[in-house]
Image (cartoon, grey):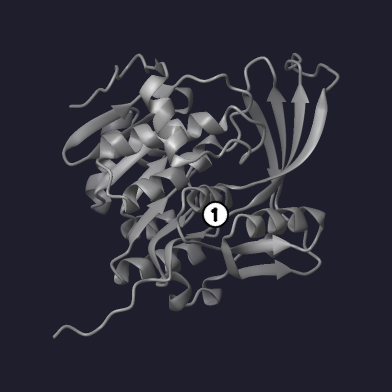
Amino acid sequence: MLPFQLMPAFDVVGLGLNATDTVILVPHFPPYAGKVAFDDELLMPGGQVASAMVTCAVLGLKTKYIGTLGDDLRGRVQWESLQASGIDLSHVQIRKNCPNQTACIIIDRTTGERTVFWQRKDCLRLQPSEIEPEMITCARLLHIDGHDTSAVQKAAQIARAQGMAVTVDVDTVYPGFEQVLPHVTHLIASSEFPSAWTKEKDPVKALRMIQQEYRMPVAGMTLGSYGALVVAGGEVIYSPAYVVNCVDTTGAGDVFHGAFCYALLQNLPIREALDFCNAMAALNCRKLGARGGISTADQARQLMARAERRVHPDFGNGYSS
């Protein structure tokens, strides 16, 4: 008889950044060094991994978040948002006399596109010594970013030793990130990362290089308003974006990643998973804030059934090769 094994307490655990955003709405961007009156100013929670975990919770996953918060107003705003989402926060640390990560996000109301200025003090840094195996192995899947690279590397190594899937959201080249990638199973990066990492200008070739070097099943990238592209199972698979009335693009990528965690745990085929993630990201763009439009799986499927799609000129509708 096989020994009895307990199911993990959580579906997904996320380790990485959160931020509290000052969102400033402007009727249009002024020319360089120009001036324009703004319409409104809002304080709203966000951050890569934290927002992805809120997405997972909305989609019905048992979710845990690991990270650090400042003890200022912005930290309290973030804590209250995460707590209201029903996420387990037992390994969130409140750092005394330390401001929370913040971002100033300027949103152009004519397009919904945003410009971001951010700051994270070193007192928020998570150290590898603060990561214990039971914090990670309590879940089926680990989702990370690349910022506190040493801590992220330790968490990813623990997860892979346990046979867990590891997904990563990375938008820039972090020093030491080559120690993280060998433990990643699913890379969905920004459109800039693959070429920046490999020095290969062709994005498909760059993704294939990363996949082959680090032996990961899936290597892909988001394409903003054009959807997402992945290399998986010997194929290049492109999923066009869904067209919505865009109010604010903030957090679209974070929601995409949370939806991708959900799709993996639901064992969705990769093309269906990308379509679902694009739909979730598009729905979030209809409201203000990084988490303003996080929707249910049913709402995403309704959009998938009826919405127009925006196709990248280089890849075509439903491209694969």
Identified at 24% across, 49% down, the residue is 217
Image quarter of residue 268: top left
Residue 58 seen:
yes
Quadrant in which the N terminus is drawn? bottom left
Residue 53 pos. (x, y %) = 52, 53
Is residue 143 placed above or below 207 in the rendered structure? below
Residue 293 pos. (x, y %) = 59, 35
Identified at 42% across, 19% down, the residue is 307
Residue 295 pos. (x, y %) = 52, 38
Image quarter of residue 41: top right
Number of other residues with Cα within 10 Å of mark 1, as a class: few under 14, some 14 to 19, many 20 or more: some
Is residue 13 placed above or below 170 in the rendered structure? below
Is residue 227 placed above or below 35 in the rendered structure? below
Q: In this view, does 249 lie to the left or right of 25?
A: left
Q: In this view, does 11 lie to the left or right of 272?
A: right
Q: Which of 160 and 83 is in front in this view?
A: 83
Residue 195 seen:
no
Residue assigned mark 1: 147
| Amino acid type of the residue that numbered disc 1 sits on in the rendered structure | His
Label 1, secondary structure: give it. Answer: loop
Identified at 57% across, 53% down, the residue is 50
